[in-house]
């Protein structure tokens, strides 16, 4: 009669326990935290790219309203502001909205029409062009973040798995 030999199933039991620990991990919290980190990274990219308004000295105005709009005018870091944003779950998607509430933000982003020859007292000049090109500061920042996102997600998932399987 054949002998089957001895088998040590301790490692398999250990693997089963770790897989149960992975199931018990709060994956919603992981996804929410990751969404907030991506939002913070987007803000860190878009804020420096956002143009400042240039006004004549005699007007007493200084630029920066559009740039401050990304953090709702609060003097906080992008990371701190993003932690306060709410994350919605829709099916298997996690949605976080990064919005600049300044009313003219979309015109600076995508461009706008204007009437040539019209005098604008705020800048003290007459308009010359019929179309002002967009600056695409948000679009460019989104594209840059999209190229970095797979590596960032891989790093976070690797850390989560390393913590569970090695800890």
Image (tube, rainbow, N blue to C red):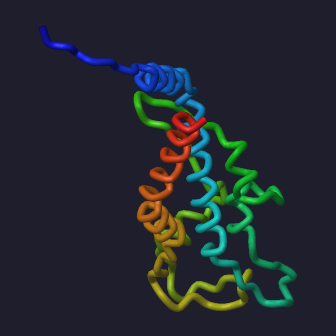
Task: Decide which of 136, 130 is in the foreground and name it.
Answer: 136
Viewed as shown, does residue 109 lie left or right of 70? left
Task: Decide which of 95, 124 is in the foreground and name it.
Answer: 95
Q: Position of residue 35 (x, y in %)?
A: 55, 45
Q: Residue furthest left?
A: 1
Above or below, 147 against 27 in this view is below
Task: Decide which of 115, 74 is in the foreground and name it.
Answer: 74
Q: Which image quarter holds the C terminus?
A: top right
Q: Residue furthest top?
A: 1
Q: Which image quarter holds the N terminus?
A: top left
Task: Decide which of 129, 66 is in the foreground and name it.
Answer: 66
Q: Residue at x 61, y 90 (%)?
A: 126
* Location of residue 166 by image quarter: top right
Above or below, 84 against 150 in this view is above
Q: Position of residue 160 (x, y in %)?
A: 54, 40
Above or below, 77 against 21 in this view is below
* Location of residue 56 by image quarter: bottom right
| Numbered marks: total | 0
Q: Position of residue 91 (x, y in %)?
A: 41, 28
Q: Position of residue 129 (x, y in %)?
A: 48, 88
Q: Residue at x 51, y 77 (%)?
A: 135
Above or below, 145 against 86 in this view is below
Q: Residue at x 60, y 75 (%)?
A: 49
Q: Residue furthest front?
A: 1
Viewed as shown, does residue 136 lie left or right of 101? left
Q: Residue at x 55, y 46 (%)?
A: 159
Viewed as shown, does residue 135 lie left or right of 85? left
């Amino acid at each position: 009669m054949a002998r089957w030999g001895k088998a040590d199933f301790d490692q398999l039991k250990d693997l089963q326990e770790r897989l149960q620990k992975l199931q018990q991990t709060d994956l919603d919290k992981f996804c929410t935290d990751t969404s907030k980190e991506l939002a913070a990274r987007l803000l860190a990219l878009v804020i420096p790219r956002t143009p400042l308004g240039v006004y004549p000295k005699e007007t007493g105005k200084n630029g920066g309203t559009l740039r401050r709009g990304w953090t709702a005018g609060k003097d906080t870091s992008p990371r701190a502001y993003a932690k306060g944003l709410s994350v919605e779950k829709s099916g298997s998607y996690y949605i976080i909205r990064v919005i600049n509430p300044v009313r003219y933000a979309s015109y600076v982003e995508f461009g706008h029409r204007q009437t040539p020859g019209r005098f604008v007292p705020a800048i003290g000049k007459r308009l010359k062009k019929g179309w002002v090109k967009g600056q695409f500061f948000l679009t460019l920042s989104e594209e840059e973040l999209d190229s970095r996102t797979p590596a960032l997600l891989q790093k976070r998932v690797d850390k989560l798995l390393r913590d569970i399987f090695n800890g």
